[in-house]
């Protein structure tokens, strides 16, 4: 066998081995990338699940909640596919969450304080962000997204305003007028700046305004004696003449007279 033949016999297997190694390395890299992407998707699904479980406590719109659950199931299934999960033990089971949705009874309309209000806003924001990808995936229509978005924004507003009013009432009961006034102002400001119209908006603004006005009415003394009235009238009355008997306010003719 010639030298060229030996070189050919050696280099071809080596080239094939190198090609196989490169393909295997590429497969490993793609697999790791898929696993990393699966972790990101699973984290999104978990955050959405946390938001849903909280939403069940503060609202009872079952259609939206079931829609969120469907989205969570889709995300977990996508993550399992990317991670090439073979075990069914760790896969997401929507049945317990669906049971919570169906059996939910009374809901909480007033939060426990400013910290929970921040948590409430964060969870509602997570749910609202979910709607746009669902439209892109054609899971819901544009009109349905707008309807759900308006409902969620109004519900969030009602929970915020209800909590501010409750905090203002509690401060008022403790005669803390300044704190109560701030909470009522926050409620009114939130209502006035809200860009979605709903039937109860005007009534809520009126209620908050009356509560704020009643705070300062309560600070004024309720009973005033006749002596106090007389003293006030005397204090407010301006003298007609000065110490020389000359009127303090008179015309030019009166000046000539004096």
Image (spheres, helix red, strand yellow):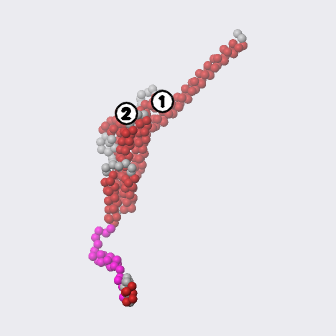
Helix, strand or loop at disc 1? helix
Can residue 242 be seen here? no
Q: Is residue 14 above or below residue 220?
A: above
Q: Is residue 228 magenta?
A: yes
Q: Which residue is mark 2?
A: 94
Sooner in the amino-acid sequence: mark 1 or mark 2? 1
Q: Is residue 15 above or below residue 145?
A: above
Residue that lies at the very extreme toward the front in this rendered image = 253
Q: Please report the residue visible at 42 percent of the width from the left and 28 percent of the height from the top.
A: 88
In this view, the mark in front (1 or 2): 1
Neighbourhood count class around disc 2 (C-alpha, 10 Å): few under 14, some 14–19, many 20 upward:
few
Q: Please report the residue visible at 40 percent of the width from the left and 41 percent of the height from the top.
A: 127
* Label 1 to label 2: alpha-carbon separation: 20 Å
In-front residue for pair 87/53: 53
Residue that lies at the very extreme toward the right in this rendered image = 3
Helix, strand or loop at disc 2? loop
Q: Is residue 124 magenta?
A: no
- Magenta range is 220-245
Query: Residue 52's mark?
Result: none
Q: Please report the residue visible at 39 percent of the width from the left and 55 percent of the height from the top.
A: 189
In-front residue for pair 15/50: 15
Neighbourhood count class around disc 1 (C-alpha, 10 Å): few under 14, some 14–19, many 20 upward:
some
Tell me where residue 243 appears, x and y as whole percent: 38, 87
Q: Is residue 44 above or below residue 237?
A: above
Query: Residue 82's mark?
Result: 1
Tell me where residue 97 appears, x and y as whole percent: 36, 36
Tell me where residue 107 appears, x and y as whole percent: 32, 45
Q: How many marks?
A: 2
């Amino acid at each position: 066998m010639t030298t060229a033949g030996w070189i050919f016999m050696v280099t071809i297997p080596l080239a094939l081995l190198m090609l196989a190694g490169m393909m295997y390395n590429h497969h490993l890299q793609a697999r790791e990338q898929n696993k990393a992407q699966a972790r990101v998707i699973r984290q999104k699904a978990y955050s959405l699940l946390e938001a849903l479980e909280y939403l069940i406590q503060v609202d009872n719109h079952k259609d939206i909640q079931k829609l969120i659950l469907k989205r969570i199931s889709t995300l977990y299934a996508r993550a399992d596919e990317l991670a090439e999960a073979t075990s069914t033990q760790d896969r997401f089971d929507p049945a317990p969450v669906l049971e919570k949705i169906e059996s939910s009874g009374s809901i909480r309309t007033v939060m426990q304080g400013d910290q929970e209000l921040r948590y409430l806003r964060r969870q509602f924001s997570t749910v609202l962000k979910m709607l746009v990808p669902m439209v892109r995936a054609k899971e819901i229509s544009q009109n349905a997204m707008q309807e759900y978005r308006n409902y969620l924004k109004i519900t969030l507003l009602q929970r915020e305003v209800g909590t501010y009013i409750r905090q203002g009432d509690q401060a008022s009961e403790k005669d803390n007028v300044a704190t109560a006034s701030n909470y009522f102002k926050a409620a009114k400001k939130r209502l006035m700046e809200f860009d979605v119209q709903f039937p109860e908006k005007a009534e809520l603004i009126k209620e908050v305004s009356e509560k704020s006005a009643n705070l300062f009415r309560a600070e004024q003394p309720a009973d005033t004696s006749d002596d106090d009235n007389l003293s006030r009238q005397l204090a407010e009355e301006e003298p007609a003449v000065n110490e020389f008997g000359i009127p303090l306010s008179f015309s030019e003719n009166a000046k000539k007279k004096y």
